[in-house]
Image (cartoon, grey):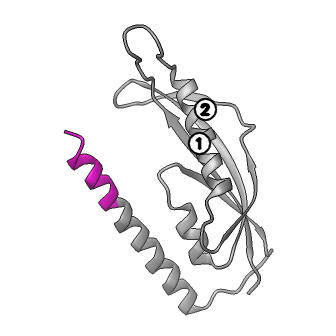
Amino acid sequence: MDKLRMRVRFDYVGRERNGRLFFGSKSSEEVAEEIRQQQAVLFRNIPIQGILIEEIDMGQEVYSVTDDVTGKSATYAPITISFYADTIEDAVRFCMKEEFRTIETLAPETMEISKADIDRIIIKANLEIINYKGYIQRKIDHWK
């Protein structure tokens, strides 16, 4: 099978940071933009097995939404990444992040997936969910 060419969008959330006394505080927009910049640097400079980054687009505007439950505003900075993946499993592993929003398959136009491929995709997605659940649990345990 040829490599998959895809475009994915991640939205990085920024929360306002209070600095010491009255100096150095950053707005949620500035924090979101800073996180987006840091992530772009990581995507450009750290190789990911089975993934070849083609293009990183940070041209989209930062936007804010209000949480229905808490009533607090959250600011997001989107980043769109075009990439090649060796396998569907590699693409799933790359996309399974909290910041994931959308994905578009650019090539191939059509593909045939075997039963074994479907099994591997589901297994890989399940492993990523389990890993993420463990990550969240560790964050909760060390939050206090």
Are there few (<14), some (14-19), or many (20+) residues within 10 Å of tag 1? Answer: few
Q: Which residues are magenta?
A: 133-144
**Quadrant that contains the C terminus:** top left
- Above or below: residue 30 compared with residue 60: above
Q: Secondary structure at mark 2?
A: helix
Q: Which residue is mark 1?
A: 38
Asked whether 125 or 50 is in front, the reply is 50
The image position of residue 83, as x and y in percent, is: 72, 63
**Residue type at mark 2?**
Glu
**Quadrant that contains the N terminus:** bottom right
Q: Secondary structure at mark 1?
A: helix
User: CB of mark 1 within 8 Å of CB of mark 2?
Assistant: no
Left or right: where 93 falls relative to 113 = left
CA distance for labels 1 and 2: 9 Å
The image position of residue 13, as x and y in percent, is: 51, 37
Asked if the magenta segment contains residue 39, the reply would be no
The image position of residue 31, as x and y in percent, is: 53, 29
Left or right: where 139 falls relative to 57 = left
Q: Which residue is mark 2?
A: 33
Q: Give the residue at x 25% y 47%.
A: 140
Q: Nearer the viewer, mark 1 or mark 2?
A: 1
Q: Quadrant of residue 2?
A: bottom right
Q: Give the residue at x 34% y 31%.
A: 69
- Mark number for residue 2? none
Of the residues under marks 1 and 2, which one precedes in the sequence? 2
Asked whether 1 or 21 is in front, the reply is 21
- Above or below: residue 107 compared with residue 2: above
Q: Give the residue at x 66% y 45%.
A: 79
Majority secondary structure in the magenta region: helix
- Above or below: residue 6 compared with residue 2: above
Asked if the magenta segment contains residue 135, the reply would be yes
